[in-house]
Image (spheres, rainbow, N blue to C red):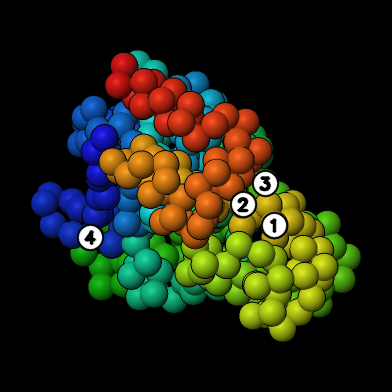
C-alpha cells in the first residue's frame, strides 16, 4: 500500500490559484495518475460533454455521462477512468482564489454542490443551460489569458454565475419557511465543521447537539431536511470513509485503524463497518486493493 498522493494546483511548474482545462489536457498533464486514487488541495469541477468513463469519489463509483457535472472538494480521494476520447472541461480553483475574489466560504457551503461528508453524485444539467454555461466557460478561458489587472475579479464573477447555474439542478431541501432554510444552513455548516474536527472522538449525535446547543432530535430533523440524511448517518459515513482511506493507503492493521478512529473495541469496529458497508473491513480491503492493482 502506498500513501495517497496530494496535488497542488500548478501551471508551467508554478503554483496558481485558478485554472481551466479540457479533459484531454488534464489527461496529458497527469498521464496514468488520473486513473490512480489521488486527492487535490483545491476544488475541482468536471463537466463532461460525452460518455467519458467512470469517476470514483471516496470509493463511490459513478458513470460519466453527457452534461454530468462533478464537484470534488479539497481532500476527497478520487480517480477518473476515462474512455478513449473523453470530451469536456475541468475548472480548478483554490481556497485562496475564493478569498481573494470575494467568493465567501459561506457562499460555497450554501450551494448544494460540494460535500466532504456525503456521497458526491454528479448533477445533470438541462439542455436549456448548456449554451449559457459554455459561454461562461469561454469567458473564463479568455480572461485567464489576458493581462487585465482585474482578470481574476472577472473570472470570479463568471465562476459564481457558473456555480449558481449548476445549483439549479442540485438537490434542494423542500422547506417552505425561508427562515427555517437559513437557520438550517447555519446548523449544517457548524455541524460539518464540528464533524470534520471531532469525528474520531465524538460518535454520538448528542455530542454534536450539545455543542450546538440544540436537541438531538432537532439536529437530525434539520440535517435530514437539508442533505437528505440524518446526523447519525453522516457521522457513520465519515467514520466509514476514514476507515476506507486508512485501510487502502496505510499499512495499519484493522485493530490499529479501529483505535485510530476512536473505537476502543476492534470487534465493535468490525461490526460497525459491516453494518454500514455490507462487507467486513478485511473483505473490503482485499477487494479494493485487488481492483486497484489490475
Q: Position of residue 135 (x, y in %)?
A: 48, 46
Question: In the image, 3: left or right of 197?
Answer: left
Q: Residue at x 44, y 23 (%)?
A: 287
Is 257 situated above or below 155? above
The answer for how far apart the CA atoms under marks 3 and 1 are is: 26 Å
Labels 3 and 1: the sequence-earlier one: 3
Residue under label 1, please give it.
232
Labels 4 and 2: the sequence-earlier one: 4
Q: Position of residue 65 (x, y in %)?
A: 54, 26
Q: Residue at x 72, y 52 (%)?
A: 229
Q: Residue at x 38, y 62 (%)?
A: 155
Residue under label 3, please give it.
169
Question: In the image, 89: left or right of 9?
Answer: right
Give residue 16's mark: 4
Give 122 or 36, whichever is nearer the viewer. 36
Question: Label 3: few (<14), some or many (≥20) within 10 Å?
Answer: some
The answer for how far apart the CA atoms under marks 2 and 1 are is: 6 Å
Residue under label 2, please give it.
236
Question: In the image, 119: left or right of 168?
Answer: left
CB within 8 Å, label 4 to label 1: no
The answer for how far apart the CA atoms under marks 4 and 3 are is: 30 Å
CB within 8 Å, label 3 to label 1: no
Regarding residue 81, the answer to whether it shows in the image is: no
Q: Quadrant of residue 251?
A: top left
Query: Which residue is outermost to the right?
Result: 176
Question: Label 4: few (<14), some or many (≥20) within 10 Å?
Answer: some
CB within 8 Å, label 3 to label 2: no
Amino acid at each position: 500500500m502506498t500513501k495517497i498522493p496530494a496535488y497542488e494546483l500548478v501551471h508551467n511548474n508554478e503554483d496558481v490559484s485558478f485554472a481551466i482545462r479540457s479533459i484531454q489536457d488534464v489527461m496529458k498533464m497527469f498521464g496514468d495518475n488520473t486513473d490512480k486514487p489521488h486527492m487535490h488541495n483545491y476544488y475541482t469541477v468536471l463537466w463532461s460533454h460525452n460518455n467519458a468513463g467512470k469517476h470514483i469519489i471516496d470509493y463511490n463509483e459513478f458513470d460519466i455521462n453527457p452534461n454530468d457535472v462533478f464537484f470534488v472538494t479539497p481532500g476527497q480521494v478520487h480517480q477518473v477512468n476515462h474512455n478513449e476520447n473523453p470530451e469536456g472541461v475541468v475548472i480548478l480553483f483554490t481556497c485562496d482564489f475564493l478569498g481573494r475574489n470575494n467568493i465567501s466560504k459561506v457562499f460555497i457551503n450554501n450551494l448544494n454542490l460540494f460535500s466532504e461528508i456525503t456521497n458526491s453524485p454528479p448533477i445533470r444539467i438541462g439542455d436549456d443551460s448548456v449554451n449559457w454555461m459554455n459561454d461562461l466557460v469561454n469567458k473564463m478561458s479568455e480572461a485567464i489569458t489576458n493581462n487585465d489587472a482585474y482578470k481574476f475579479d472577472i473570472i470570479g464573477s463568471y465562476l459564481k454565475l457558473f456555480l449558481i447555474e449548476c445549483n439549479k439542478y442540485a438537490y434542494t431541501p423542500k422547506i417552505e419557511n425561508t427562515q427555517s432554510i437559513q437557520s438550517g444552513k447555519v446548523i449544517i455548516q457548524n455541524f460539518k465543521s464540528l464533524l470534520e474536527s471531532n469525528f474520531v472522538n465524538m460518535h454520538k449525535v448528542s455530542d454534536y447537539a450539545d455543542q450546538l446547543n440544540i436537541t438531538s432530535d432537532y439536529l437530525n430533523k434539520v440535517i435530514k431536511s437539508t442533505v437528505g440524511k440524518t446526523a447519525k448517518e453522516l457521522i457513520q459515513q465519515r467514520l466509514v470513509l476514514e476507515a476506507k482511506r486508512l485501510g487502502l493507503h496505510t499499512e495499519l492493521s484493522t485493530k490499529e485503524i479501529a483505535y485510530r478512529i476512536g473505537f476502543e473495541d476492534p470487534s465493535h469496529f468490525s461490526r460497525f463497518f459491516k453494518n454500514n458497508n455490507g462487507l467486513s473491513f478485511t473483505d473490503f480491503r482485499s477487494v479494493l486493493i485487488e481492483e486497484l492493482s489490475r
